[in-house]
Image: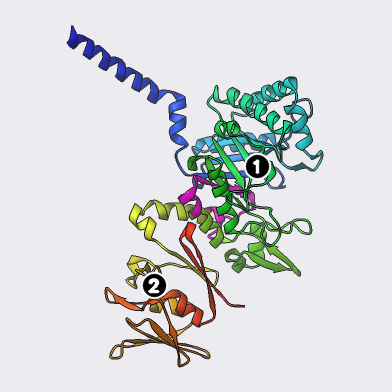
């Protein structure tokens, strides 16, 4: 009898596990653990909306925008046939497709926050909104919804936002659909904007992920790396788990009020613009994210978040300078590294171009020494900035010259000579595995270069002093 009971319990347990593993909610939960590349695809452009989508390099597409009316219904989307085609091609390529509801402004209706306020404050209008949105999701075979209410306020507005989110979440989760939100970035790790404080903990728990709009801060600081970093930290401090944080990356430049410039147009003007974050065109300074910053933000997201959100994918190119392609390259490169390799790997951007050290080059790999200083292989690093390099093996001195700069770097000494003047260091040049390594900061600063270290992405940025 005891053997039969034990056998019966085992069979029942196996059946429960099998049922759980086949249940849609269980499968859905596993999918969300993967790194996300969320591509916004807007109907704001004249071209077909899905023109620039590289389906093999994205995991989710968010079509924008579905505009709410004050009665809880919706303005018909501008290109319904294109949306249907996008969903079909997305699903054929195992890409989930969501609809973004709202946005900051509609060219025909103006700011949309008052509409959200009116809908969310009424039980009847909230019900209409959710029912109509549910019908839209079913009609277009969508995988979920992103709420883009910009923005609820503290107080009653916050409570109404919470009601809308919780009721919509209940409806969508019952059908195994995503619910996500576009939320603000933050310029402080501890103190976000007031509108972000209006998003309650219950709301944050209900979202499958949040798309952080870490852009549009101002012209010069439109979307710098540090803003992405502090934005992630702010929402982590708010209790949002890493697996629910997706950092937004703009594919367009500021200012936008004079002449709209998207990434593909900037590159068309000059291919070198692809590697910069600023460009001057017709006397106007444009600020954006080029390849180097986009790759660095992707590494940041791999370390501290769970994905990147791209606004908007139609602004990209489709060649080797494609931002989506470079994001995909970073993901693939990182996936081939083990934990130790990932933690120790350092990235370099010198004169706006990434300098790659690879084992196959047999030229040495940078490392951080016991003094917490970065040492780099001498020849590859200095020849990148057109420095002439020689080595006197009898004196064990590296001799580097460029223009009026004459630098001598003794091996295993805590000093260098710049134009005959002794400069003390807190580290030493060394020879390791037959390769000569030099302290990056001291040497590059000797040639009038500025060194910037980004801990969150393990990236060293080397730029000429102005």
- Vertical placement of 311 versus 66: above or below? below
What is the x, y in percent for residue 270?
A: 64, 68
Farthest residue, direction top: 1
- Dot 1 alpha-carbon crowd within 10 angstroms: few under 14, some 14 to 19, many 20 or more: many
Q: Nearer the viewer, residue 263 or 244?
A: 244
- Dot 2 alpha-carbon crowd within 10 angstroms: few under 14, some 14 to 19, many 20 or more: many
The image quadrant of residue 10 is top left
Q: Which residue is rendered at x = 18% and y = 9% of the image? A: 2
Q: Is residue 465 visible?
A: yes
Q: Nearer the viewer, residue 286 or 445?
A: 445
In the figure, is residue 449 to the left or right of 121? left
Q: Is residue 279 magenta?
A: no
The mark tally for this picture is 2
Q: Nearer the viewer, residue 33 or 61?
A: 33
What is the x, y in percent for residue 275?
A: 57, 65
Q: How is the image coloured?
A: rainbow
What is the x, y in percent for residue 335?
A: 39, 51
Farthest residue, direction bottom: 420
Q: Which residues are magenta?
A: 300-324
Disc 1: which residue: 196
Disc 2: which residue: 375
In the figure, is residue 3 to the left or right of 132? left
Q: Which mark is residue 254?
A: none
Q: SS class of the residue under badge 1?
A: helix
Q: SS class of the residue under badge 2?
A: strand
């Amino acid at each position: 009898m005891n053997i039969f009971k034990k056998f019966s319990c085992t069979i029942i347990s196996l059946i429960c596990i099998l049922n759980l593993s086949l249940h849609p909610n269980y499968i859905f939960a596993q999918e969300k653990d993967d790194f996300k590349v969320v591509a916004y695809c807007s109907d704001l452009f004249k071209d077909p909306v899905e023109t620039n989508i590289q389906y093999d390099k994205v995991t989710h597409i968010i079509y924008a925008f579905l505009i709410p009316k004050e009665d809880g219904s919706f303005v018909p989307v501008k290109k319904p046939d294109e949306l249907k085609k996008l969903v079909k091609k997305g699903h054929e390529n195992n890409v989930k497709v969501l609809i973004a509801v709202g946005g900051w402004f509609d060219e025909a209706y103006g700011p949309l926050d008052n509409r959200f306020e009116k809908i969310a404050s009424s039980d009847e209008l909230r019900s209409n909104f959710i029912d109509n949105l549910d019908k839209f999701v079913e009609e277009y075979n969508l995988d979920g919804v992103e709420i883009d209410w910009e923005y609820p306020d503290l107080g009653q507005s916050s409570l109404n936002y919470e009601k809308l989110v919780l009721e919509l979440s209940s409806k969508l989760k019952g059908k195994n659909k995503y619910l996500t939100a576009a939320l603000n970035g933050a310029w402080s790790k501890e103190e976000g904007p007031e509108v972000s404080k209006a998003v309650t903990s219950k709301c944050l728990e209900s979202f499958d992920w949040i798309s952080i709009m870490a852009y549009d801060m101002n012209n010069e600081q439109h979307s710098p790396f540090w803003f992405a970093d502090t934005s992630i930290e702010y929402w982590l401090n708010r209790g949002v788990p890493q697996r629910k944080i997706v950092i937004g990356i703009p594919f367009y430049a500021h200012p936008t009020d004079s002449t709209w410039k998207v990434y593909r147009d900037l590159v068309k003007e000059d291919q070198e613009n692809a590697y910069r974050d600023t460009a001057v065109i017709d006397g106007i300074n444009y600020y954006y994210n080029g390849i180097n910053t986009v790759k660095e933000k992707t590494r940041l997201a791999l370390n501290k978040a769970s994905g990147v959100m791209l606004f908007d994918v139609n602004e990209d190119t489709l060649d080797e300078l494609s931002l989506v392609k470079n994001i995909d390259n970073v993901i693939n490169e990182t996936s081939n590294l083990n934990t130790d390799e990932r933690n120790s790997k350092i990235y370099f951007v010198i004169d706006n171009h990434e300098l790659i050290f690879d084992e196959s080059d047999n030229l040495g790999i940078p490392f951080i020494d016991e003094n917490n200083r970065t040492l780099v292989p001498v020849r590859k690093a200095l020849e990148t900035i057109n420095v002439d390099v020689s080595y006197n093996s009898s004196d064990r001195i590296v001799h580097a010259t460029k223009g009026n700069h004459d630098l001598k770097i003794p091996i295993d000494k805590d000093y260098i000579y710049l134009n005959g003047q002794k400069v003390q260091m807190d580290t030493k040049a060394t020879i390791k595995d037959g390769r000569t390594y030099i302290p990056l900061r001291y040497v590059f600063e000797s040639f009038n270069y500025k060194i910037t270290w980004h801990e969150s992405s393990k990236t060293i940025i080397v730029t000429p002093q102005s």
